[in-house]
């Protein structure tokens, strides 16, 4: 790859992916609307960290602006499009549904159309572990049914997968969906629990622990996510010649179209109270826990089966939680304190 478009480049995952591509000598064109869902300053500081360089171009554009998105593609040739921009957050989708419709549905349609109209560059896009919804059978496999979302955010991500398959089928656009599992690390999102916990603990404030702490999450370190993304970007989706239209249920993550879906997770879920204990040891401070009931749209546990990812690119995330949290805590202190 010589030239790649990264959407959501001022976001957590997008920033790290762009940094890695630039280190490998890939020219990066970045797109982001710098919205205020969380700290605008943090997003600007991520861009500042990339710096002014000849091999990085930034466009401040909203995904819902079809003309603006199309303009980024006009006259350009991308070897891949890594689409990481989206309205994130499960709980926020309950109170602000229109933000998700515009960004995750209208915006995604605009990206698909731009790819279709400008050379069909292979598309990787961010899906989410939230698509597994009400499925309580663990670990979650890309072979599982994902027809029972429990939040609008999850519903928009499943919609993205369906839309991608349609474009792969109709136009031959190679589409690879990435179901991310609780990504954490330096330059992370302040709306995520680990970030909120760190801030509260260091400020001597109580932390809200939902479902009375009886939760499990498949925490996945950012460097492992980036490695997965970069490897898959170099391996565009291809049709599965063995996919059986008469018996499609066992293999919903592939198709006769150039379509694939992968779990990007650490495949080692941690109990929430264990996670808090590790965070306490890393920070050298005790947490004042405030146990609360389950929140709407949430799930008790996430756990990734990463067999498909390993088979595709011979890699699976595996950074130990303590190691990842140490790196995050070091960054947090340097950035905020």
Image (cartoon, helix red, strand yellow):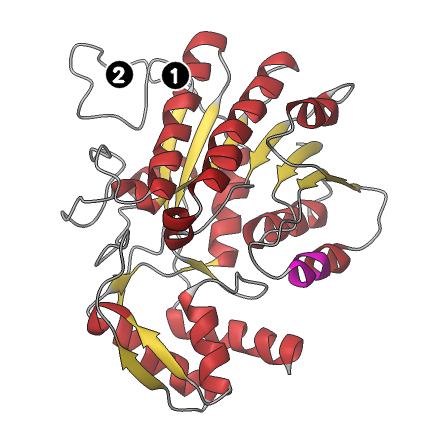
Q: CA distance from mark 2 to mark 1?
A: 8 Å
- Viewer-proximal residue, 84 or 41? 41
**Disc 1 secondary structure class:** loop
| Along the viewing direction, whichever of 234 and 83 lies nearer the viewer | 83
SS assignment for the magenta stretch, majority? helix
Name the residue: 50% across, 26% down.
Answer: 236
Give the mark count. Answer: 2
> Dot 2 corresponds to which residue?
243
| Mark 2 Cα shell of 10 Å, populated few (<14), some (14-19), many (≥20) | some
* In the image, residue 67 above or below residue 59: above
> Is 39 located above or below residue 232 in the figure?
below
Q: Are marks 2 and 1 in contact (CB under 8 Å)?
A: yes
Mark 1 is surrounded, within 10 Å at the Cα level, by few (under 14), some (14 to 19) or many (20 or more) other residues, namely: some
**Which image quadrant: the C terminus?**
bottom right
Looking at the rendering, the stretch of residues picked out in magenta corresponds to 40-45
Q: In the picture provided, is 62 more to the left or to the right than 132?
A: right
**Side of 225 where 274 appears, left or right:** left
| Residue 246 seen in render | yes
Quadrant occupied by the N terminus: top right
Where residue 303 sits: x, y (%)? 26, 53
Frontmost residue, 227 versus 172: 172
Image coordinates of residue 5 in percent, x first then y, are: 66, 34
In the rendered structure, does residue 177 fall within the stretch colored magenta?
no
Q: Quadrant of residue 6?
A: top right
- Residue 42 magenta-highlighted: yes
Secondary structure found at label 2: loop
x, y percent for residue 168: 44, 16
Q: Which residue is mark 1?
A: 239
């Amino acid at each position: 790859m010589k030239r790649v478009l990264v959407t959501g480049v001022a976001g957590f995952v997008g920033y790290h992916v762009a940094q890695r591509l630039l280190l490998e000598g890939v020219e990066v064109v970045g797109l982001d609307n710098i919205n205020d869902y969380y700290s605008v300053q943090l997003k600007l500081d991520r861009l500042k960290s990339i710096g002014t360089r000849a091999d990085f171009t930034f466009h401040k554009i909203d995904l819902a602006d079809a003309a603006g998105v199309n303009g980024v593609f006009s006259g350009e040739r991308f070897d891949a499009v890594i689409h990481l921009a989206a309205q994130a957050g499960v709980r926020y989708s309950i109170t602000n549904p229109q933000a998700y419709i515009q960004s995750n549905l209208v915006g995604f349609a605009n990206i698909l159309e731009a790819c279709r109209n400008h050379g069909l560059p292979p598309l990787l896009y961010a899906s989410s572990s939230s698509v597994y919804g009400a499925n309580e059978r663990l670990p979650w496999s890309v072979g599982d049914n994902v027809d029972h979302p429990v939040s609008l955010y999850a519903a928009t991500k499943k919609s993205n997968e369906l839309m991608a398959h349609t474009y792969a089928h109709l136009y031959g656009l190679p589409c690879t969906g990435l179901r991310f599992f609780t990504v954490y690390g330096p330059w992370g999102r302040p709306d995520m629990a680990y970030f909120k916990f760190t801030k509260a603990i260091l400020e001597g404030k109580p932390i809200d622990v939902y479902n009375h702490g009886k939760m499990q999450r498949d925490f996945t370190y950012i460097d492992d996510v980036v490695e997965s993304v970069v490897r898959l970007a170099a391996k565009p989706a291809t049709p599965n010649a063995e996919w059986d239209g008469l018996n499609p249920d066992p293999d919903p993550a592939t198709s006769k179209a150039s379509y694939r879906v992968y779990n990007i997770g650490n495949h080692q879920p941690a109990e929430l109270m264990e996670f808090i204990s590790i965070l306490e040891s890393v920070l050298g401070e005790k947490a004042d826990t405030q146990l609360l009931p389950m929140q709407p749209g949430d799930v008790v546990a996430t756990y990734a089966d990463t067999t498909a990812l390993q088979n595709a690119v011979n890699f699976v995330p595996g950074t130990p939680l303590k190691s990842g949290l140490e790196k995050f805590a070091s960054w947090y202190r340097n950035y905020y304190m």
